[in-house]
Image: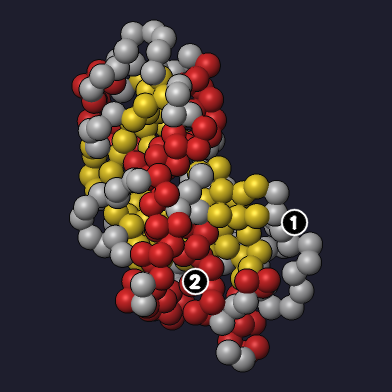
Amino acid sequence: MSVALLLPLAACGQNDPLGASEVVGPRLTIGVATDQPTMGYRKGDSYTGLNVEVARYVADRLGYADWQIVWENATESEGGRMLRDGTVDMIVGVFVDDAMNADYGFDFAGPYLSERQAVMVRRQGGQPIDSLDGLAGRKTCVVRSSRSAVQMRKRFGEEARLVEQPGATQCVTALLSGMVDAVVAPGAVLAGLHGVENTDTTRILPERFGDEGHYGVALPSGSTQLKHRVDLALRRMREDGSWKRSYERTLGTLGYEADPDQPNG
């Protein structure tokens, strides 16, 4: 792909982005949450997870080599601002659901994974929570400005006692310290956090709840042509088997089964 096609996206990421020290020439700045093992995770200069693999595939289809990607940590609370001010060209791993207003404030390409909310609790200590209904009136951690908070309020109303943290990792820390009684997040996110190092201390309830949500790619509002190209890339990823292989390398290593509804590969 010619440099002329790369230049329109090359101006972003001017705020000391992660891993950008050796990036020169045209570049694509991609936002992704980096505290979610098997979904989006940063260790040193290495980025892994399903969202990361999707991002790399999309970038390749847009004509960017891996070395031209600049990664930015994009939390749910900061993602909208990062798109509006040009910090990133896109955010991969954005979770949207039917509870959101139809006007997201950004263009949404995809989806590439469907999910619902899940619940993580401690294995021991305090009054046990054995079912979804047990969350009523109990302190529950959710990521700030997330869809999980919307779904908890929708399900429990005034009985939803929410404690917000900037990221999923902080929510798990709050759970293990006894600050909260449970964590609510999309099932895929909790599966990674539980499976990496917390299998002896936490468990995930079998029930999932809330409106079905979808993971996709957020783009600045009005990115009609770019949205079309990203949609084509995601479709190609499913058709050529790359999505399935990425899933097996990431969430699949945990034996995790995503929401059976399409689209999931």
Amino acid type at image mark 1: Asp
Which residue lies most toward the top here? 126
Residue pointed to by mark 1: 16
Q: Nearer the viewer, residue 201 or 115?
A: 201
Residue at figure coordinates x 63%, y 71% from the top left:
66
109 left or right of 34 in image: left
Is any part of residue 105 visible from this angle?
no
51 left or right of 118 in image: right
- Tell me the element at label 1: loop
Residue 135 x/y as whole percent: 28, 20
Image quarter where the C terminus lies is bottom left
Please tell me how many numbered marks the rendered image carries: 2
Residue at figure coordinates x 44%, y 18% from the top left:
180
Residue at figure coordinates x 61%, y 91% from the top left:
2
Residue pointed to by mark 2: 57
Residue 34 x/y as whole percent: 57, 48
Residue 119 x/y as whole percent: 33, 30
Instruction: Tell me how far mark 2 sits from mark 1, CA to CA.
Output: 24 Å
Badge 2 or badge 1: first in the primary sequence: 1
